[in-house]
Image: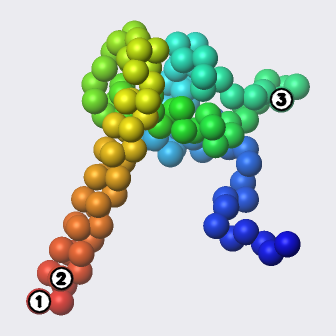
């Protein structure tokens, strides 16, 4: 069996690492866990949170609704209950558009440097 270099090798992420990924405070993540049970990470015997990719995907959706689109927590939770597939698709599209925008900005900067 060949080594899969496409997969991330890290399985667990700390609260600080996840908070840094989304530019939010660690306390924000801990609070979101109380409102959105689907992002509740595993904990060690000492109580250290260990986020897996599934938790991070859930946080990405919540972050999009709350921080990017400006929904209140209750409205975001309700939206997830009513139309989970639509919210997931919207999150993917917005993330893709953000990546395309960043790539275009990088290309523009590169072209400006050449000229």
Q: CA distance from mark 3 to mark 1?
A: 55 Å
In the rendered image, the residue lying farthest to the left is 115
Q: Residues within 10 Å of mark 3 (few under 14, many from 20)?
A: few
**Disc 2 designates what residue?**
111
- Do tag 2 and tag 1 residues touch (Cβ < 8 Å)? yes
Q: Residue at x 23, y 67 (%)?
A: 104
Q: Residue at x 73, y 69 (%)?
A: 4
Q: Is residue 75 left or right of residue 105?
A: right
Image height check: is 81 above or below 63? Answer: above
Image height check: is 74 above or below 63? Answer: above
Q: In x, y percent, where is residue 103?
A: 29, 67
Q: Residue at x 60, y 26 (%)?
A: 39
In the image shown, does 115 or 86 lie closer to the viewer? Answer: 86
User: Is residue 73 something one can see in this rendering?
Assistant: no
Q: Earlier in the sequence, mark 3 or mark 2?
A: 3
Q: Is residue 82 left or right of residue 16?
A: left
Q: Quadrant of the C terminus?
A: bottom left
In the rendered image, the residue lying farthest to the bottom is 114
Q: Earlier in the sequence, mark 3 or mark 1?
A: 3
User: Is residue 82 something one can see in this rendering?
Assistant: yes
**Disc 3 designates what residue?**
44
Q: In x, y percent, where is residue 23?
A: 44, 40
Q: Is residue 9 left or right of residue 61?
A: right
Q: In x, y percent, where is residue 58?
A: 54, 32
In the image shown, does 60 or 47 lie closer to the viewer? Answer: 60
**Disc 1 designates what residue?**
115
Q: CA distance from mark 2 to mark 1?
A: 6 Å
Q: Secondary structure at mark 1?
A: loop
Q: Residue at x 35, y 12 (%)?
A: 75
Q: Residues within 10 Å of mark 1 (few under 14, many from 20)?
A: few
Q: In x, y percent, where is residue 87?
A: 39, 30
């Amino acid at each position: 069996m060949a080594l899969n270099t496409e997969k991330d090798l890290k399985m667990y992420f700390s609260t600080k690492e996840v908070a840094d990924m989304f530019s939010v405070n660690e306390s924000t993540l801990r609070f979101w866990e109380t409102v959105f049970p689907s992002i509740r990470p595993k904990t060690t015997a000492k109580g250290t949170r260990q986020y897996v990719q599934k938790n991070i995907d859930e946080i990405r959706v919540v972050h999009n609704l709350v921080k990017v689109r400006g929904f209140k927590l209750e409205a975001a939770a309700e939206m997830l209950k009513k139309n989970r597939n639509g919210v997931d698709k919207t999150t993917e599209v917005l993330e893709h558009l953000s990546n395309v925008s960043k790539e275009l900005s990088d290309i523009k900067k590169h072209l400006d440097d050449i000229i």
